[in-house]
Image (cartoon, rainbow, N blue to C red):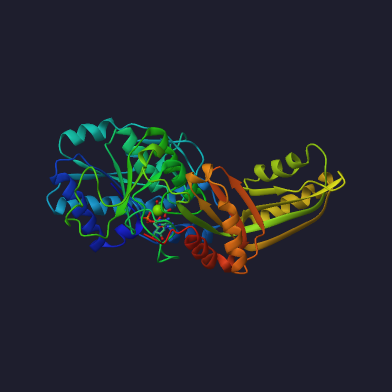
Amino acid sequence: MKFGGTSVADIARIRVVAQHVKREVDAGHEVAVVVSAMSGKTNELVAWTRDASPMHDAREYDAVVASGEQVTAGLLAIALQHIGIDARSWQGWQIPIRTDNAHGAARITDIDGSELVRRFGLGQVAVIAGFQGLGPDNRIATLGRGGSDTSAVAIAAAVKADRCDIYTDVDGVYTTDPRIEPKARRLNRISFEEMLEMASLGAKVLQVRSVELAMVHKVRTFVRSSFEDPHAPGMGDFDNPPGTLICDEDEIVEQQVVTGIAYAKDEAQISLRRVSDRPGVAAGIFMPLAEANINVDMIVQNISEDGSRTDMTFTVPAGDLDKARLVLDQIQKDVGIDVVQSEGNMAKISVIGIGMRSHAGVAASAFKALADRGINIRAITTSEIKISILIDAAYTELAVRTLHSVYGLDKH
Ligand code: ADP
Ligand code: ASP
Ligand code: MG
């Protein structure tokens, strides 16, 4: 059972979480609980590290930001003990949850679940601090924002859990972010592939890495609500709890062409005009960007008219725009780029669905719908199961709602 930030936002909420845990314990299950920091806490801690120094040591960043989860793990263990449940808290290093050395965005490499399993046998609930582990340097490492989801799925895999329930402030995965489109509908099931696209294209309901792990280790993962009455009918239904099951494609009977719409704000667009067109140019541009740790997305290159010069456009996270411009300034002459143009305040809207593999015309209806609303498309990329469209961020909400209705996602 994993509980996110809003689910453990204060002591009253933590008491409700304890009741959800109690329900499962009373039903005879062995339970490991993963908690996030109280909502807003991690943002506050991150801001403090930046305030102390903009160029800080990533290991010390981790020492600071991991503390939020230490607090909630202890508090939930206390709340559980208070209602008569044997429980103890675990920090990442105590288990240990081993990670690689990428402080601030570490990946879990190994979890020794044996002590947890032994204590399950004694009837003890494990309350585990999410988002953190122990790096090869024996120092605390954190897993990147939203990383408690990944902690939960990884622990579920390590202890061979029957299920991993991700409790959050919505009661499942919706066709799009319900905060933007109130007509969004809850999906009963979504395939791993689609969830992976949704998450990586901006739907923050699950961290991308957690979906990858669930897919690889075949962890049955449910997204469900912590805000429902813990003892409401059906909440303890073991095989079919209320929420969204993330599963293999072939477990989904009724395939839709389009499953969901995701969006990502805070994108920036960079266009390189009249770039000399010869082998090695793309490498000459994108290698230095990669070395500067800039995540490049949506690369579009035109075919040059006369074989000598071409235009290239790509997107980067808005926060990396200044850094990217510096890198490009350094290589502009050598690579042969006439002009570098850039613009912040972009958004990427994506249409996702496995059914696209076998249906034509999905992209065309998106373009038509956006045109009817007067929304200009700046760049387009596609894969087998998704179409991504770059637009001005001001139109994000309108574009999401427009596409949501075009594919009939708001109809029952
Ligand atoms: P937690 O703190 O529990 O980890 P998050 O805020 O990380 O919760 O994730 C839940 C939020 O994800 C929801 O409140 C919702 O606004 C957002 N969200 C974005 N896209 C979707 C979607 N397709 N389905 C459900 N929630 C979504
Ligand atoms: N507390 C961490 C964050 O806010 C991890 C998480 O909530 O999943 O990113
Ligand atoms: Mg989250």
> Which image quarter is the C terminus in?
bottom left
- Specify the quarter for ligand 1: bottom left
Give the vertical position of 134 relative to 272 (above or below).
above
Q: In which quarter of the image is residue 54?
A: bottom right
Query: Which residue is at the far front?
Result: 360
Number of on-image labels: 0
- Pinpoint residue 379: horizontal percent, then vertical percent: 66, 55
Q: Would you say residue 9 is visible in this rendering?
A: yes
Query: Left of 240 or right of it: where is 4?
Result: right
Q: Which residue is drawn at 31% across and 56% down?
A: 171
Give the vertical position of 35 relative to 47 (above or below).
above
Q: Residue at x 54, y 57 (%)?
A: 264
- Pinpoint residue 86: horizontal percent, then vertical percent: 16, 44
Query: Left of 331 or right of it: where is 90?
Result: left
- Pinpoint residue 83: horizontal percent, then vertical percent: 13, 53
- Pinpoint residue 262: horizontal percent, then vertical percent: 49, 55
Q: Choose between 294 and 312: the one closer to the eye.
A: 312
Q: Would you say residue 104 is visible in this rendering?
A: no
